Amino acid sequence: MNRPVHFEIHAGDPAKLSKFYAEVFGWQITHMPQFDYYLISTGDNDGPGINGGFVKRMGPGAAAGAAVNAFVCSLGVASVDAALEKALAAGAQVALPKMAIPGVGWQAYIRDPDENIVGLHQADAGAK
């Protein structure tokens, strides 16, 4: 089976957007100036999850309200409510509000400051 091993977030200004993700989600960002690439460490390598990078967007971003034209990653969070609050305070917007996935958990989607869609997922078998 082929599983995702790396992700990339396209950004008009990768340095600026990396600050948003570091502040809101606690990610560690390392700039690689020789490639103008920003490596993302999302957490310890001894648990589930993958790491990624920020890459300079090669053209205009999607227009507001346009259909999503990429893979959308959902981040596991302890609390969707707390993650939403922190993301909104740092400049994100709600793309889809918090909803229950019965027996699985809670899900919401944000638009980061560069208009990328990101899912927030809180596991909760009691969600209804």
Image (cartoon, rainbow, N blue to C red):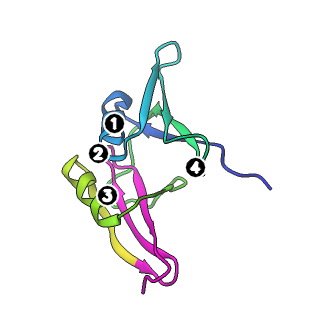
Q: Residue at x 45, y 24 (%)?
A: 30
Query: In the picture shown, does residue 67 fall above or below 40?
Result: below
Give the quarter of the image for residue 114: top left
Amino acid type at circle 1 is: Leu
Spot occupied by residue 51 in the image (x, y as percentages of width and height): 55, 40
Query: In the picture shown, does residue 77 fall above or below 40?
Result: below
Amino acid type at circle 3 is: Ala
Instruction: Indicate yes or no whether the magenta region holds residue 61.
Output: no
Mark 3, secondary structure of its residue: helix
Query: Mark 4 sits on what residue?
Result: 49
Q: Residue at x 23, y 59 (%)?
A: 85
Query: Mark 3 sits on what residue?
Result: 83
Spot occupied by residue 127 in the image (x, y as percentages of width and height): 43, 82
Q: Report how far apart the C-alphas of labels 2 and 4 lie in the structure.
A: 23 Å
Eye-nearest disc, 4 or 1: 4
Q: Which callout, 3 or 2, points at the residue further toward the start of the chain? A: 3
Query: Mark 2 sits on what residue?
Result: 113
| Residue 22 visible somewhere in the drawing | yes
Q: Is residue 5 left or right of residue 86?
A: right
Residues packed near mark 1 inside 10 Å, few (<14), some (14 to 19) or many (20 plus): some
Count up the numbered dots: 4
Query: Mark 1 sits on what residue?
Result: 17
Q: Which callout, 3 or 1, points at the residue further toward the start of the chain? A: 1
The magenta region covers 100-128
Q: Report how far apart the C-alphas of labels 4 and 1 lie in the structure.
A: 21 Å
Q: Which callout, 1 or 2, points at the residue further toward the start of the chain? A: 1
Q: Which callout, 2 or 4, points at the residue further toward the start of the chain? A: 4
Spot occupied by residue 26 in the image (x, y as percentages of width and height): 37, 41
Q: Residue at x 47, y 41 (%)?
A: 9
Q: Quadrant of the N terminus?
A: bottom right
Q: Is residue 42 left or right of residue 5?
A: left
Q: Residue at x 41, y 80 (%)?
A: 100
